[in-house]
Structure formats: C-alpha cells, structure tokens
Image: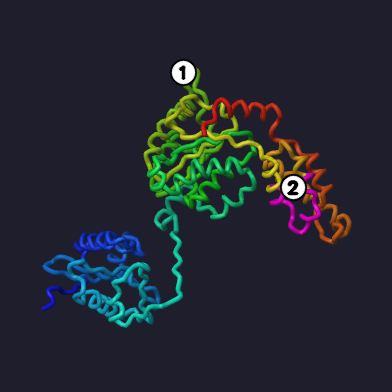
Amino acid sequence: MTGWRLREFHSDDLDGILHLWEEVRSSSIEPVYALSEVIASCQKDHAIVAVHADEVVGAVVGRAAHDQGWVVFLATTTSWRGRGIGAALLAALEKKMAPHGLAKLSALMPEAETRVDAFHSQGFELKQNLRYFERRIPVQRQELDSLSELGGRILPRDLWESVAGMRSEKEILEQRLVLPLAQPDLAEEFGVVPPRAVVLFGPPGTGKTTFAKAIASRLEWSFVEVFPSRLAADPRGLAGALRETFVKISDLEHAVVFIDEVEEIAAHRSGEPPSALQGVTNELLKIIPAFREQPGRLLVCATNFIRALDTAFLRHGRFDYVIPIGLPDEAARLAIWHRYVPESVIDTVDLPLLVRRTAGFSPADIEFAARSASQRAFEAAIDAGGAGRTLDGARGPRTEHYLDAIAGTRTTVSEEVAAGFLEDIAALARV
C-alpha cells in the first residue's frame, strides 16, 4: 500500500500547490516558472496531484503547445520523497496530455536541481549543450484594451540608446529615475525610495518629450501622454476628465504618464473670484498625492516656463526631482549631426565645423538645419539633371549645404532665454 493516490487538480488544491512551491524555494532552488504561471496552468492546462489523507504531497503541472508538451512544475514534499511519487505523477501527466498527440514532452530544470530520478525513470533524456533564453513581456495582454482607451502605447525598446549625446542629462535620469524603478528591491536595500513624479524643465526644443519617452522605453513600461487641450472638450470639464483619466491609468500595472506644457494647467493661482483654470490646478494637486501611492508608475511633467508654475505644485512631497534639460554640448551636437547626415556622405562632411557653427542650437534646431540641407541638395541635384556628387562620387548634401542651412536657421533659444534658464537652475532645480 503506497499511502498516497493520484487525482486531477481541484481548485481547493491551490494551498497545497503554494506549499509545494514555497518548499522548493526554501531549498535555495528557484523554479523556472513563476508561481503565477504555475497556478494559471493548474487552472487552464493540465495538473495532477498526489494526496495523502486529503493533503497534497506532490504535484505535476503541464501545458501543450501544438505537438510540444512542457512540464511546468513537478514537486514532492520532503517527507514523501523517494516513494515513486514523482515518476507516477509524470506518467499520469503524459497519459492525460496524450489526446493532444504530443511528439515530445520536455522539462526545464534549474541547473542546481539534483532530484531528477523521476525523469530518468520515465525515459526522459538529459540534453547537453542547450541554453535557455527567456524574455518577460512587460505589458500583459489584458492591459492592452485599457492602454488603447487612454491613447497610450508601447514604445520601441531602443529609444534610450538612440537619444544622441546629452550624456550628463542621461546620467542623471538613469541614476535618479530609471535604476531605482528598474531595481526596486536593491533600491530598498539601500534605503532609496523610487521616484513617483518628476518635472523636466528647460528651453523649447531641448528634448524633454524625447527623454520622457526614452525613460518609458528604458523601463519597458507603457507610455501615456495626457493632453489637457483634448481633455478640455470633455463634457465633464477639464478637471473631471483629468480625474477620470488618472482613474483609468490606475488599471495599468506599469506606466510612465507624461504631461507636456504642464504650465497650462498648473500656473500660478490668482484673482478673485477663482477662475475655472484654478479648479483644474486644484484637481491636479489632489491627483498627484494619490498617484504617488501607486507603485509601478512615474509621472513626468515638462515645462518651458518653470517660473509660471504654481509654487504649491513644485513643493517637496509632490515631485521628487526637478531636473533641467538644457541645450546640447559639443559631444551631444556631434552625436545629433551623426544621426541626420546620410551615411553615404558622412566621411566627406566637416562635422567638427558643423558642431562649432551650431553652438546654442537645440536638438530640434539641428534637425531642422540638417533636413533643410538635405532638401537643398536634393533640389540642386534635380536641377542639375541628377548630378550633385561629392568628390568621391557619392551623391548627397555637402558641407556647404549644411553651412547655408545653419545660417538660415533661426534658433529657438535666444541668449536671454538661455541666461534665464541658468537662473532657473540655480533657483528651482532639484536633482
């Protein structure tokens, strides 16, 4: 008499599965599949349990994909090991999955796992020279409807790397924002509280929106941009629509929420009687503390005119950091030019000269000048019947095209605005 019996999994067995899971982990062996995956397969795929006096003493969980079967979980309680339960569970699982017409049943085991007799006894072969690759999809399928309703999106994974130059700004954003949010357990160990809300400020066209998107890309979180101008048309009014939007955002597991030109809804409150816009500012001031209580979220507000923001908006406790995003330095300008000069002519263009001539240019200014130079070169080539080649025979814009375009570009940031930005850094920045 074995003292145990096998039967199919019942929902009442979840506590037993959890106990087995914890027992495996207590042996310093991390299971390949997460507990949530095991439980999901118990309920939707195939699971067999071994019970003794209604106590779960072993379990096997499997799932099928086309003609390939996978053992998701196999465990036996310590006191019942060595009694053939594991082998019996595997045999029962294979029988239960037989209607799928499986050509192969496979199992992934942690390298440190030594209790593999059950697999050997059931004819499983150990495959050598294999590597296991895994990537967790950051946004689950059930979130996509909510994200679509909000007008949010999943951004490409390489945006962070594609932000050219701006090394000092990237370092600050990565160290203060990205790393604590990406590694919360390590941050907690060092007493670091991951940020919940930040303000990016600086002159127009310096890349604040690009940085907000890059942060979401780096974290692999959903990106939701809130447009106050669109919400203003809502029948509930701007304040009500803003409140409802943030309620919907709470349905997302992880999200970077971006509000550009936030001064439009968070400007200095003044005047008697209070204006309708003051009600919107009050609503936003109420939303932020509630937003901060939810983990896995980051609010990024951007402004070109930080002095216009209400003093209560910027106080400690609402925003963790107030980070300046300024004009690109020489290294950043060189990287930006590399992005826009065609590869076919980049070796023939005097990039150091372009970098010197665009001191005081914003990234948007450089992009405009680069595209303008390409257009001029294109038109000249058309007029010349397809000519317009460089000395080495490559066709495309030349240095003189870029210099002409730079000379014809009106910079976004005046000397007065640049000087005011430095004053704002001294008075308001918090990094």
User: Percent position (x, y) of residue 364?
Assistant: 68, 42
Q: In this rendering, would 56 be left or right of 133?
A: left
Image quarter hosting the N terminus: bottom left
Q: Residue at x 78, y 56 (%)?
A: 345
What is the three-letter code of the residue carrying label 1? Pro
Name the residue carrying label 1: 273
Q: In this rendering, would 35 be left or right of 175?
A: left
Query: For the residue carrying disc 1, how many other residues have a C-alpha within 10 Å: few (<14), some (14-19), or many (20+)?
Result: few
Q: Residue at x 29, y 60 (%)?
A: 25
Q: Residue at x 75, y 40 (%)?
A: 358
User: Percent position (x, y) of residue 318?
Assistant: 44, 32
Magenta stretch, residue numbers: 336-353
Q: Is residue 339 magenta?
A: yes
Name the residue carrying label 2: 370
Query: For the residue carrying disc 2, how many other residues have a C-alpha within 10 Å: few (<14), some (14-19), or many (20+)?
Result: many
Q: State the residue lying farthest toward the top.
A: 272
